[in-house]
Amino acid sequence: MAANKDYYQTLGVGRTASDDDVRKAYRRLARKYHPDLNPGDKAAEERFKQVQEAYDVLSDGKKRKMYDQFGFYSEQGFPGGGAQQPGGPGFGFGGFDFSEAFNNAGAGGAQGGFGGGSFSDLFSQFFGGRQGQPQQSAAEKGSDLEYSLSIDFWQAIKGTQVRLNISRLDGCRACHGSGHSGGGQAECPQCHGSGNVTQMAGAMRFSLHCPKCGGTGRIRNACPVCRGEGRTHATESVEVRIPPGAAAGSRLRVGGKGNSGTMGAAPGDLYITVRVEEHPLFSREGDDIHIRVPVTVSEAGLGARIEVPTVDGRALLKIPQGTQTGQKFRLREKGVFNARKNTRGDQIVEIVIQAPDVRDERTRELLKELSRLDSRDPRSALWDNL
């Protein structure tokens, strides 16, 4: 058997983490290492696979219980021999303590032993106290999917609708998700119809319900399309509505568009992480829009009313006399609409004074005259603070 994997360490959660904590850790790491967000990064792709594997086990109650008990999960159940053992597990071992035998178990036993206790304890761990009853496979909710979507600046500001092609596990249409085809039942090839298999723990041998048929001894013919999975891989085009004001890194949820569940269980959800392309003029901070606007020396010195671009078109801005480079002005409610708050941000205009283009002698003389009229040293304050 391969070396045990610490799925809790992979997701960065403790062994007592709740299902919600496990789900949140998975979503955070899936966004971080998703191949769509790390194109060409093999290390990120491998890490994403490890995160997915850990979540598949820890998000399922039965799988997690087995992993917590023995440090691994296997579809075949408890490790050891698979030979058939006639009879069923419906017999007790009350009053017998096999802790020494288990603690000294060899290669055929469970890793690390059982640490003591009776066979009754062991059976209760596997069957939850329902000894002798066949274990039926439980329906499982489908897992969530994570995708990323790039949109331009204006699509994020105004909102839009896009179509996204996704790959997901969909319910098999041939068997309607049951995993079985018509034609009755056949003898289970693993337990040969007995419903039980022998498992070894050191020198001890005991019988467990067959994990393949759930202890019934019979299996229904598998669907030839999905091979008994009940689900098939499918590519689907999903229409996604991007609300006005969508920010970079925001996550959108499309309910029921994750992987289909097993045995008719509910599907998971589709989560889309939005990436927004930069704009050459506008930048965004929260719900506010920022822009740098150039003005002439005369406009800054004398004051003026200038037109500035906004996400709604042109707007008038009054520049007071004596405006300096770097000075900022606010245009109320000219920013991004926030649907959750039902408010709009502002537009922040930063002034950049543009030096005149001296092309003739007349312009040069006027600037010299200006320097004689205003002889202040704009750098004097620098020396005062040394």
Image: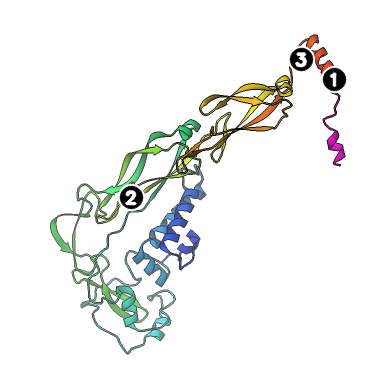
Which residue is denoted by mark 3 in the rendering?
A: 358
Percent x, y of residue 236: 32, 40
How packed mark 2 is, by other alpha carbons closer than 10 Å (few <14, some 14-19, many 20 or more), is many
Amino acid carrying mark 2 in the image: Asn
Percent x, y of residue 214: 24, 67
Element type at marker 1?
helix
Label 1 to label 3: alpha-carbon separation: 19 Å
Which one is nearer the viewer's eye here, 40 or 176? 176
Decide if residue 104 is in sight here.
Answer: no
Above or below residue 3? Residue 375 is above
Percent x, y of residue 327: 69, 32
Specify whether residue 382 is painted magenta: yes
Label number found at residue 259 = 2
Q: Nearer the viewer, mark 1 or mark 3?
A: 1
Label number found at residue 373 = 1
Farthest residue toward the bottom?
95
Specify whether 104 is left or right of 307.
left
Percent x, y of residue 77: 33, 68
- Magenta region, residue range: 372-386
